[in-house]
Amino acid sequence: DAGVIQSPRHEVTEMGQEVTLRCKPISGHDYLFWYRQTMMRGLELLIYFNNNVPIDDSGMPEDRFSAKMPNASFSTLKIQPSEPRDSAVYFCASSLAGAATNEKLFFGSGTQLSVL
Amino acid sequence: QKEVEQDPGPLSVPEGAIVSLNCTYSNSAFQYFMWYRQYSRKGPELLMYTYSSGNKEDGRFTAQVDKSSKYISLFIRDSQPSDSATYLCAMSGAGNQFYFGTGTSLTVIP
């Protein structure tokens, strides 16, 4: 399996623009997680899905952030409008089952977002 | 109090040294304990996975869990420059989230 695939690897945009990050989880994995990583705060969970349904979005910082999972093989994280403080590395991760089981979490390579 | 505490370092050691990385946690319901290694500009990759208390060894790496003290460790023997990375501890088994430490930055000097 190719692992978790994220695109783009790098995104540079101007404040106010819409940004869309994409993720393809590992085939067969029922759980998909979106994280944001910064030096100051480390890895922060933004939202996670189970079988394409959003389960917990309490980590989404503001209404400017939204996430969708239209099918089992694709998810998007959208920021509209983007702000400089959104600059971070955004990771997508997937797991066969949830964290309550002994299943492991696998990460993509991340999207480095810079908002100027 | 954060669920998982990890000293961010940075930690710098000479090649061949034994490295000890540690995390403490507050939720006694955690059952699964992981260590991830993250190279610069890469995603975290699973390095070690343990269940409950005890030790697990994989080559130069040993993961240790002490549930009574809510303390986990990762030991790296004969450290190599290629071990230079950020190491994140993670825990699960209490709900459907994975809980991460902030990561410890390690540099192994040749």
Image (cartoon, grey):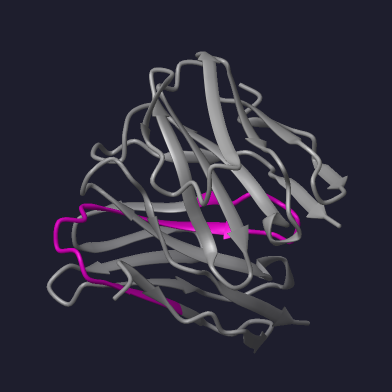
Quarter of the figure with residue B33: bottom left
- Residue at the image position 38 percent from the left and 18 percent from the top: A51
* Image coords of residue B12 (percent x, y): 65, 87
Can residue A26 be seen by looking at this rendering? no
Which residue is at a point 37% across and 75% down the rendered structure image?
A: B5
Residue B57: image location, x then y, percent? 39, 60
Quadrant where the N terminus of chain A is found in the figure: top right
Q: Which segment is the magenta one?
A: B21-46
When the figure is inspected, residue B92 is found, relative to residue B64, above or below; the finding is above
User: In the rendered image, is residue A111 in sight?
Assistant: yes
| Quadrant of the frame with the C terminus of chain A | bottom right
Residue A99 lies in quadrant: top left
Residue sitting at x 34%, y 35%: A103
Residue A18, percent from left and from top: 76, 36
- Residue at left offset 77%, top offset 50%: A113
Give the x, y percent position of residue B43.
64, 49
| Left or right of B55 on screen, residue A88 | right
**Residue A92: quarter of image:** top right
Residue placed most toward the observer, B83 or A3 = A3
Residue nearer the viewer, A19 or B98: A19
Q: Is residue B29 magenta?
A: yes
Figure disc tally:
0
Determine whether B64 is above or below B90 in the image: below
Q: Is residue A83 magenta?
A: no
Q: Nearer the viewer, residue B30 or A36?
A: A36
